Image: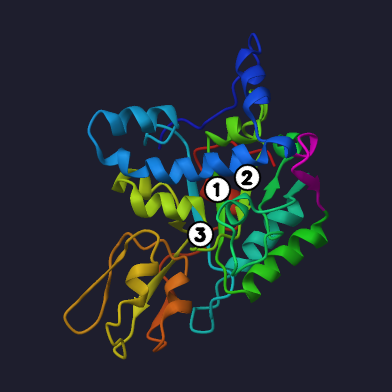
Amino acid sequence: MKEKYKSMSKGLGIVDWIKRRVSVKQSTLPIGRLAFKLLVFQAPLTKIPVIGTLLKTITLLTNTRTTQGYTIPLNIDVSEDLKPVTVPIDLMKKAVREATYRTAMNTCICRDAYKCMNYPHDLGCIFLGKGAKICIDNGIAHEATVEECIERIDKAASLGLPGQSYWIEVEGFLWGFQNEDMDKFLELCFCCSCCCAAEKFMKRSDSESRLLFQRSIGYVAKVESTCTSCGECISCCPRLAIQPGIDKVVITEDCGGCGICINKCPSNSLKMILIKPLKSDLKDYFEDIDLKL
């Protein structure tokens, strides 16, 4: 395991000054939406030698950096599991309850950018830790109570959305997180396949970049014998982890356990199975970051 990431000092304050100037504010939300779309647009460039390496270096997405994300399937049936100590949705709720500070985005910038017609725009991300307080100062978020955050999690589960937990380094510039606060935030998202910039980026990018996001916390999808090979799950998988097979589709080892395919399968031929024990805390999955939430 590489050395744990630790936040940088302010130094001369030049980087923090840049972050404050370029970060998304209420007055610059249209630019923020455009930035998300540009990220998706440039994803195929990661497959091109030299250009791809340069692009990933600029956006801090190389495997030498710390950016990562984990999927928390919120509404899966765990009745067949061997009674894990914590079910995925409770893992996310526990993180919310134990955080010293909670920030809730006023709107989902992805759904706004793509004018989502399928899910509510006010079901935005939650940030845990005081590092994201600057989003409140910028007018795009508000301080949230435990109860409000739990309500968002339950709403996402009722809509069949998976949860994601992200620590994305370049978001320090997008949202304005200051250098000394980069270990004081963890993002909780409730992404939809139709709009999520991270999912769109994964589908279009090279394999190295794709596997940075939506890592499994312990669950993967399994195909039952009733599979009709209709292909619905193939087209919806953000990690391209489902492939055509002879009698049924095949789930590859790249499965991130998001559960999106479960909801899309018309023959109910997919289920989630637990292949390794869940950790006791959500932040324990980010073992190479010394998080202070």
140 inside magenta stretch:
yes
Label 3 vs label 1: CA separation? 9 Å
Residue at image position (36%, 77%) is: 232
Front-most of 50 and 291?
50
Say if residue 100 shows up in the picture. Answer: no
Q: In which quadrant is the N terminus drawn?
A: top left
User: Answer yes or no: do the residues labelled 2 and 1 have beta carbons within 8 Å?
Assistant: yes
The amino acid type, in three-letter code, at marker 2 is Leu
33 or 92, which lies in front?
A: 33
Compared with 187, 48 (above or below) is above
Q: Is residue 164 left or right of residue 47?
A: right
Q: Of the numbered discs in the image, which one, if any, rests on residue 186?
A: 2
Q: Dot 1 lies on which element? A: strand
Looking at the image, what colour scheme do you see?
Answer: rainbow
Is 15 rendered above or below residue 240? above
Crowding near the residue tagged with mark 3, few <14, some 14–19, many ≥20 C-alpha atoms within 10 Å = many
Q: CA separation, marks 3 and 2?
A: 13 Å
Could you tell me which residue is drawn at 73 percent across and 36 percent down?
Answer: 27
Region rendered in magenta? 135-144
Query: Which tag, 3 or 1, sits closer to the chain's start?
Result: 3
